Amino acid sequence: MPLQNRVTPFGEILAIEQRGLYMGNRGIIHDPVTRTLLSRRWTNKAWIICRCVIPGRRREVMARHSWTELFFLDETTALSAGHRPCYYCRREEALAFARAWARAHDLAGASAAQIDARLHAERLNKGAKRVHKLQGAPADLPDGAMVVLSGEAYVIAAGRGYRWGTSGYQPTRRLAHADGLLTPPSTVATLRAGYACVIHPSASDVPDRRPPSACL
């Protein structure tokens, strides 16, 4: 049985067979003895997106009383769930995200703490995933933003929607409307301001975003 550590665009953490491009965490939310999740789904506001491979470091997943390893199909999935790039293992991307965030919000700069506080207010609604009202058509969203339609998540790329699935994205379709916005609005503004996130290669006609090697 797979461990319960795969994150969906809705922020749920499931036990599914899925190879992802990124790892991340929300603090310690598991029992290392049983390697199962506790009832809580986060312990701090710093929900981060990490590289799967860090030279000189190797961890057995969910095996010690340390941060809980979570995995994402791609960066768009992690952003939709409310995470942001890690300053330790993805510093270049984290700084690019902060610069785009500052441009989007007309700020001189943005710290990790400021970003985390704003995202935390936008990612949850009484402990569950917050779905935001969509202003305009899905096709008007920047590449990498995710919407929900009839209970399914779609990533928008080049104006078209790709349905998220456990094995990757399904064939593209044009969405005339959506039921709501999954990606936090502040992150959508950051994407619009120039942050180029990584979309899984199963969305085959999306321009290459230099995807990293997949996690186990």
Image (spheres, helix red, strand yellow):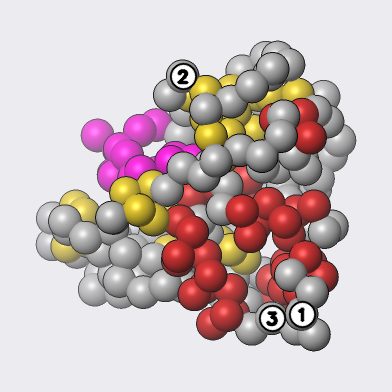
Cβ–Cβ under 8 Å for marks 3 and 1: yes
Q: Percent position (x, y) of residue 165?
A: 51, 25
Q: Is residue 101 visible in the rendered structure shown here?
A: yes
Residue on which the image places disc 2: 150
Q: Residues within 10 Å of mark 2 (few under 14, many from 20)?
A: few
- In the image, residue 72 lies in the stretch drawn in magenta: no
Is residue 51 shown above or below 46? above
- In the image, residue 4 lies in the stretch drawn in magenta: yes
Q: Percent position (x, y) of residue 37?
A: 21, 54
Q: Is residue 79 visible in the rendered structure shown here?
A: no
Q: Is residue 118 left or right of residue 107?
A: left
Between 50 and 188, the residue placed more toward the observer is: 188
Q: Name the quadrant containing residue 135.
A: top right
Which label was assigned to residue 155? none
N-terminal of the two: label 3 or label 2? Answer: 3
Is residue 143 shown above or below 162? below
Cβ–Cβ under 8 Å for marks 1 and 2: no
Q: Percent position (x, y) of residue 74?
A: 60, 44
Measured in 3D between alpha carbons, the distance from the residue under mark 3 to the one under mark 1, in whole angstroms, is 7 Å
Between 49 and 20, the residue placed more toward the observer is: 49
Rendered-image quadrant of the N terminus: top left
Residue on which the image places disc 1: 107
Q: Percent position (x, y) of residue 56?
A: 56, 74
**Start-end of magenta stretch:** 1-17
Query: Which residue is drawn at the image coordinates 64% and 83% (left, top)?
Result: 111
Between 199 and 187, the residue placed more toward the observer is: 187
Query: Which residue is drawn at the image coordinates 46% and 34% (left, top)?
Result: 18
Q: Is residue 105 left or right of residue 41?
A: right
Residue on which the image places disc 3: 110
Q: Residues within 10 Å of mark 3 (few under 14, many from 20)?
A: some
Q: What kind of residue is marked 2?
A: Ser
